[in-house]
Amino acid sequence: MRCFFHLVSNHDEIIDNAGIEVQDLESAKAQALLAVEELRAEIGIEADDWSGWRLNIVCPLGTLLHSMQLIQTVH
């Protein structure tokens, strides 16, 4: 199945137009975690810069399959 990984905040979004082929949703979640770790390593995700941003995994029809916060908050 093809999944797309969009970076989304309340005010902006960075759309993944290519997507990747994965076996299932669990594989997509694993790829999303890798992508977030790469972002942290490459550009240094700081809480102030990425607070409120999330990575949405969607199917080709645009249906939200999973969403994860880039910065984990403690409540």
Image (cartoon, rainbow, N blue to C red):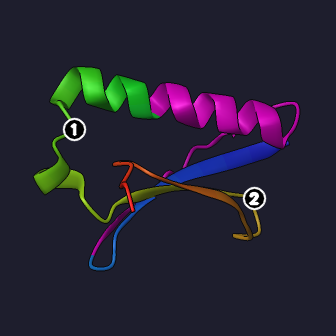
Residue at horizontal 66%, vertical 29%? 30
Residue 21, can we see it?
no
**In this picture, is 63 found above or below 21?**
below
Q: Amino acid at mark 2?
A: Cys
Residue at horizontal 27%, vertical 79%? 11
> Which numbered dot is residue 59?
2
Residue pointed to by mark 1: 45
Q: Separation of disc 1 and disc 2 at Cα?
A: 26 Å
Q: Amino acid at mark 1?
A: Ile
Q: Is residue 24 magenta?
A: yes
Towards the viewer: 5 or 44: 44
> Are discs 1 and 2 less than 8 Å apart at CB?
no
Categorize mark 2 by other alpha carbons within 10 Å: few (<14), some (14-19), many (20+): some
Q: Position of residue 12 (x, y in %)?
A: 29, 72
Which residue of the protein is positioned furthest toward the bottom in this rendering?
11
Magenta stretch: give its range: 12-35
Q: Quadrant of residue 64?
A: bottom right
User: Considering the image in quadrants, where does the C terminus appear?
Assistant: bottom left
Q: Is residue 17 magenta?
A: yes
Residue at horizontal 57%, vertical 37%? 32
Q: Is residue 46 left or right of residue 64?
A: left
Q: Is residue 28 left or right of residue 40?
A: right
Q: Secondary structure at mark 1?
A: loop
**In this picture, is 18 found above or below 40?**
below
User: Considering the image in quadrants, where does the N terminus appear?
Assistant: top right
Residue 47, can we see it?
yes
Q: Secondary structure at mark 2?
A: loop
Which numbered mark, 1 or 2, is in the foreground of this view? 1
